[in-house]
Amino acid sequence: MAHRCDVIKHLCYTRPMPNDPHIRRALEADLPRIFEIRGVVRENRLSDPRLVTWEDCLWFIAGPGIWVWENEGHISGFSAGDPRDGSVWALFVDPAHEGRGIGRALFQAALGTLREAGHGTATLSTGPGTRAEQFYRKAGWTAIGHSAKGELVFQSAL
């Protein structure tokens, strides 16, 4: 397993890379494709693009990482875990590539970021009645309430 030292506000830690050869850390050059995927998803669409900025993504790339699934030079999905609060910040797969296990693999990569940061539990939120809700329930996550935006908040032990 490869290791990489990342620096976030003077905190240096080693992070194992996911075992899947299709998953790698995103580069700044990947951001146009990441934003494209974020815009074409069928559910949990970003209603206000100002909520997720280029600068947000640059912080993740320079720090804990955004994980991308790449096959033959094409990015099909991405994920990120936020070590500041133990949440899954992003998990999105291009609709043209759904149903192939990409989301499950990227989900594990984001959770790995949280585990490596020392979190014992993780949270995430998603719209109620979505396929994402079912995905998280099948993965064993428990709904613990609603966010201020009305999304379901899930929690799971890592």
Image (spheres, helix red, strand yellow):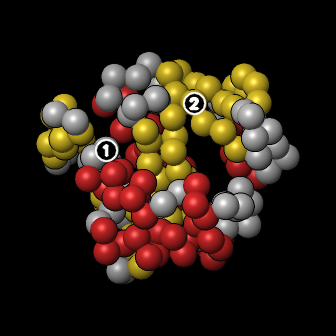
How far from the left and from the top, in percent, is residue 72?
36, 80
Q: What element carries label 2?
A: strand
Amino acid type of the residue that numbered disc 1 sits on in the rendered structure: Pro
Identify which residue is drawn at 19% across, 31% down: 11
Q: Is residue 5 above or below residue 52?
A: above
The residue lying at 58 percent from left, 55 percent from top is: 51
Q: Which part of the image, by quadrant, shows the N terminus?
A: top left
Between the residue at mark 1 and the residue at mark 2, the CA separation in whole angstroms equals 17 Å
Q: Which of 97 and 41 is in front in this view?
A: 41
Residue drawn at x 31%, y 31% as measured from the top left: 116
Measured as percent of width and height from the top left, residue 6 is found at 19, 43
Viewer-proximal residue, 151 or 49? Answer: 49
For label 1, the SS is loop
Mark 2, Cα crowd under 10 Å, few <14 / some 14-19 / many 20+, is many
From this view, report whether residue 151 is shown above or below residue 101: above
Earlier along the polypeptide chain: callout 1 or callout 2? 1
The answer to which of 76 and 89 lies nearer the viewer is 89
Q: Is residue 100 visible?
A: no
Which of 137 and 39 lies nearest the eye of the viewer? 39
Going by the image, does 99 lie left or right of 4? right
Q: Is 140 on the left or on the right of 30, as rendered?
A: right
* Disc marking residue 96: none
Q: In this view, does 29 lie to the left or right of 107?
A: left
In the picture shown, does residue 152 fall above or below 157?
below
Where does residue 98 sit, x and y in percent of width and height? 63, 66
Looking at the picture, which amino acid does disc 2 mark?
Answer: Thr
Find disc 2 in the rendering and name its residue.
123
Q: Residue at x 46, y 75 (%)?
A: 33
Q: In which quarter of the image is residue 71?
A: bottom left
Mark sitting on residue 64: 1
